[in-house]
Image (cartoon, rainbow, N blue to C red):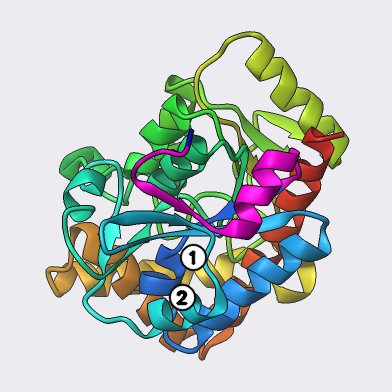
Amino acid sequence: MTHPLLTIAPEVERALAEGAPIVALESTLITHGLPNPDNVAAARRAEAAVRAGGAIPATVALHDGRILVGLDDAHLEDLGRATGVAKVSRQNLASVLGSGGWAGTTVAATMIAAHLAGIEVFATGGIGGVHRGGEDTLDVSADLEELARTPVSVVCAGPKSILDVPRTLEVLETRGVPVVGWGTDEVPGFFARQSGHRAPSRVDDADEAARLVRRQHALGLEGGLLFCVPIPEAAAIPREEMEAVIDRAVREAEAAGIHGPAATPAVLSRIAVLTEGRSVAANLVLIEHDAAVAASLAVALRA
């Protein structure tokens, strides 16, 4: 029976009925991650990569009191142009569903929607985590808690590099979330291929990843798995260069009194300026690549 708060696109509904592979995609990339028209271009590239990999894309967003699972092209355009859009996580999902207009779903909210719809795999650029200075501010993304409780496999390019990556990995370990390097022994650094932190485990292809997912579920362990995929080498930005840029952007945001949910888009916007747009180009590539890898996992899980 369809969930009363979900509106599932016909194509996604058919795929669910047929047991076809599906990949969920988040929408804060569109509403808060990139400027228009880069945001819509990134969403389209991610959906195209999922299709090319043999799966059906299901971009998730909120609209007029409904969770939409699967957006058509007109939806993507409307969402990409919308202003004053709420950023939705577990904490405010029910509240925002009581409002009109559009809202973008974070990793946490997209995982919830995907699980309600029966979708096993989700692709995103990077997950949220412990913010720099989080040991004092307690600014920790709900994405980490969602990964510990909701059984959806998440494919990403690692924690967002503007975060405190070591503390993020510590929280994931404490909450029992498997962090898996895809073809790498090191957790990727989002814009960079390395972060300087070892991945707790590794897989080298989709079949191996699917077997790991099945073992996790067979053990009855709660939560999802986090597969971390390095950005393609041609689009990567050297780790040392990005660290200097990120440190500057974070210091400037703190000096301006920008904290909480507003911090990430502000810092990313400043990084784009400081890298003369190279970070935006890298972001587009890694999102598309993550979507392709997620499609391969979704297909392997259906084999």
Query: x, y percentage for residue 241?
Result: 56, 72
177 shown above or below 81:
above
The residue depicted at 14 percent of the width and 75 percent of the height is 256
Q: Which residue is mark 2?
A: 75
Query: x, y percentage for residue 47?
Result: 66, 67
In the displayed orientation, state which residue is furthest to the top.
219
Looking at the rendering, which quadrant does residue 84 occupy? bottom left
153 shown above or below 73:
above
Q: Quarter holding the C terminus?
A: top right
279 shown above or below 302:
below
Residue 143 included in the magenta stretch of the image: no
Q: SS at mark 1? A: helix
The residue depicted at 73 percent of the width and 21 percent of the height is 214
**Is 253 left, or right, of 127 in this rendering?**
left
Label 2 vs label 1: CA separation?
Answer: 36 Å
Q: Which residue is mark 1?
A: 243
Residue 15 included in the magenta stretch of the image: yes
In the displayed orientation, state which residue is furthest to the front.
1
Residue 292 in view here = yes
- Disc 2 crowd rating (10 Å Cα; few below 14, some 14-19, many 20+) is some
The residue depicted at 82 percent of the width and 58 percent of the height is 53
Judging depth in this view, the residue of 219 and 125 nearest the camera is 219
Which stretch is magenta? 2-21
The residue depicted at 66 percent of the width and 54 percent of the height is 194
Looking at the rendering, which quadrant does residue 288 occupy? bottom right
User: Which amino acid is tagged 2?
Assistant: His
Q: SS at mark 2? A: helix
